Image (cartoon, helix red, strand yellow):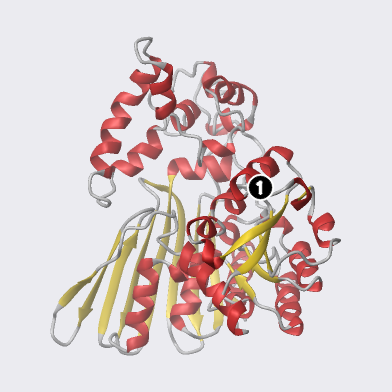
Amino acid sequence: MSSTGVVIGAGDRGYDAYATLLLDEPDLGRIVGVADPDEGRRDRFADRYSLRTDQCFAGWDDLFAQPRMADYAIVATGDAHHVEPTLLALEAGYHVLLEKPMALDEADAVRIVEAAESSGLVVGVCQVYRYSNLFSALDDVVRSGELGDLVSIQLAENVAFWHYAHSYVRGHTRRSTVPWLLQKSCHDLDLLAWLADARAETVSSHLRPTELTERNAPEGAPQHCIDGCPHAATCPYDAVATYRDLTPLLSDLAMAERPIGLGSAAKALRAVRPKLLASDRVPSAAKQRLEWWRWPVAAVTDDHTPEGLDHALRTTRWGECAYRVADNDQPSAQTVSITFANGVLANFTLQSCSHRSMRTVRVSGTHGSAWGELHALDGWLKVADHRTGRVRDLKVPTAYDGHGGGEAPLLRDFLRAIGSGTQPSASARSSLEGHRIAYAAMTAAHTQQTVRL
């Protein structure tokens, strides 16, 4: 079935995530409208998706004031602005694919669930890791009964040190008004509820405040790293290394085992790239091929020139010393413990000091165990039979979407639900349980008391 869609929010996710599948597989449908207050983002989006001027709107109010333009709306606005466009889209008759988190509090999340169910429309939430290569394979193992009765689940989201500094110290989500646990890890809490296949009964949580504060700033560090920090060579958070030299990103990719050759190529590029960009002997055309204007650099500036990047590093918070940003208060680590109604115990850790970004998981049952890792592109999963002692490896294919291969299957499931009149696997109702755990965990962390749901 071919369906049409509009995108609300043309930032990183709206521009570069789910809708791009339609460019590769036009038989699935096309995007026919966009709403975003930033003219530059609208123009960039319109160019990629071949939209006319009359299909581009400065806000969701303007778009939804028109007669219904499409079958569905992808809501990819900022985390604090998911509720209103979702409710307006449903009121206007659009099916909705909603970026996570649904809402910043439980009351608004319930409003979305109730509106979705009363409308009779399809509402999917972008719980993309359910569809990832590793976790979909793990779910198949759990559902098969091979592990016996589930006893415990251990899951960790290990955020790379530089990713934390980019997104949660310098970035848009540096303030705990949008809690880090909710913004980053409602994915993970959703996975725990999904794998446990039961409602949560109790939640406890502890957090550690960030170390990246003014009182810990190295002596002599300037406000902006580009202004000649004496600690640049030893600071893991140096903005020049992060955004101009791409040292942390290339270091992460250098550890990739798949696709074959990527790790060694990234390692070599990490060593030679700064020298090539600084050399007068390298033609400008060749230098342009070495430039990188996607995430995380795309968040820093829309001026995709070396001069534009340097200007942003001198004048915006993206170039500030991570210790001197001053208005950041997200924690650097948080743990969550959950008891489920079926007796499954789960523990989750979110931490900011990993050598690379990855998720680690272990599911233990009365008959077997399964454990694995998921990186940006690759991963692995092992399953042990307690009765025979046999351990087998499950293939986890290489993924190229940054979310373990889950983006395309999620959109296909959503479009399939529209065609069949059913709800997708990650429906608003299904996603609510993981959100409830997140809201309870925030309460538990701040009150130092266990929350009973």
Q: Position of residue 260 (x, y in %)?
A: 23, 49
Is there any visible trace of residue 189 in the rendered image?
no
Which of the 4 quarters of the picture holds residue 298? Answer: top right
In this view, 233 is above or below 358: above
Please name the residue shown 38% across and 32% down the image.
247
Please name the residue shown 49% across and 80% down the image.
339
Q: Position of residue 314 (x, y in %)?
A: 60, 21
Mark 1 is on which residue type? Arg
What secondary structure is marked by label 1? loop
Residue that badge 1 annotates? 175
In this view, 115 is above or below 183: below
Is there any visible trace of residue 167 in the rendered image?
yes
Q: Nearer the viewer, residue 370 or 11?
A: 11
Which of the 4 quarters of the picture holds residue 95? Answer: bottom right
Q: Nearer the viewer, residue 11 or 382?
A: 11
Q: Nearer the viewer, residue 244 or 90?
A: 90
Label 1 CA crowd tier, 10 Å (few <14, some 14–19, many 20+): some
In this view, 347 is above or below 76: below
For this view, does 420 lie left or right of residue 40? left
For this view, does 114 lie left or right of residue 24? right
In what quadrant of the picture does the C terminus appear? bottom right
Q: Nearer the viewer, residue 133 or 412?
A: 412
For this view, does 159 lie left or right of residue 209? left
Please name the residue shown 47% across and 90% down the image.
342
Q: Position of residue 75 (x, y in %)?
A: 67, 61
For this view, does 423 lie left or right of residue 290? right
